[in-house]
Amino acid sequence: NAGVMQNPRHLVRRRGQEARLRCSPMKGHSHVYWYRQLPEEGLKFMVYLQKENIIDESGMPKERFSAEFPKEGPSILRIQQVVRGDSAAYFCASSPPPASRTDTQYFGPGTRLTVL
Amino acid sequence: RKEVEQDPGPFNVPEGATVAFNCTYSNSASQSFFWYRQDCRKEPKLLMSVYSSGNEDGRFTAQLNRASQYISLLIRDSKLSDSATYLCVVRLNYGQNFVFGPGTRLSVLP
């Protein structure tokens, strides 16, 4: 059973470009979470999604950032017009559906975004 | 008040020491509790879930005090490999979001 997969693992963008980060949850998991971690700082929640639905986006910046989890395919975190301050590690996590009564969240290896 | 608070750290302890981390949460209706560890530049990994009766896994013991809204993690006989940041995580209920504490950094020194 493959774990949570994220790609790319490393992404370099120039200021003003777009960054697309992908996350495939563990098999059987229906919920996806995105977190951002700036260098030497803690984990910051961004958004919580299930397929075709955003459950909680209270941690998402109001501009330039968006997330989706389509019916088919991975979850995508999209950052438009990147700035140097977007340079960070972006972690995705997944968890089973609530009906499973299994409560654990597992993380992917992260995507390290560097904005030049 | 933050939803989940932890000892600010860092904790610097010698090998073989016993170290305890504390965590408090604000929502008394919270149902699920976890400890994760995060190594430098790596993803957080589940260390253990925390059950009402307390639970132990080798050198690690977790306790939950619902009345005081307090969770603890005890590490006995610390190893160099225990050096990491320890994250306290709370969930209100199934289907609700996970809330992470800021983490406590541990350095085990030779």
Image (tube, coloured by chain):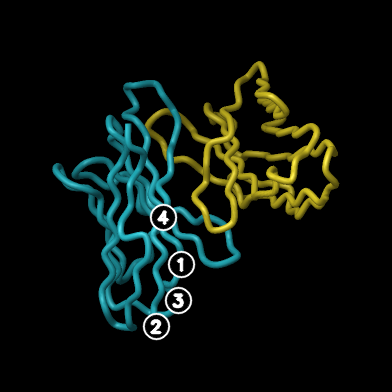
Chain colours: A cyan, B yellow
Question: Disc 2 versus disc 4: distance between alpha carbons?
Answer: 19 Å
Question: What residue is disc 2 on?
Answer: A116
Query: Are labels 2 and 4 assigned to the same chain?
Result: yes
Q: Residues within 10 Å of mark 1 (few under 14, many from 20)?
A: some
Q: Which mark is residue A88?
A: 1
Question: What residue is disc 3 on?
Answer: A85
Q: Which chain does the numbered disc 4 sit on? A: A
Name which of mark 3 and mark 4 comes first in the sequence: 3
Foreground mark, 1 or 3? 1
Name which of mark 1 and mark 2 comes first in the sequence: 1
Q: Position of residue B19 (x, y in %)?
A: 80, 39
Q: Residue furthest top?
A: B53
Q: Is residue A15 above or below residue B25?
A: below
Q: Which chain does the numbered disc 3 sit on? A: A
Question: What residue is disc 4 on?
Answer: A110
Quarter occupied by the C terminus of chain A: bottom left
Q: Quadrant of residue A46?
A: bottom left
Q: Amino acid at mark 1?
A: Ala
Question: Disc 1 versus disc 3: distance between alpha carbons?
Answer: 8 Å
Would you say A62 lies left or right of B91 here? left
Question: Disc 1 versus disc 4: distance between alpha carbons?
Answer: 10 Å
Q: Residue furthest left?
A: A72
Name which of mark 2 and mark 3 comes first in the sequence: 3
Q: Quadrant of residue A30?
A: top left
Foreground mark, 3 or 4? 4
Foreground mark, 1 or 4? 4
Q: Residue at x 23, y 44 (%)?
A: A53
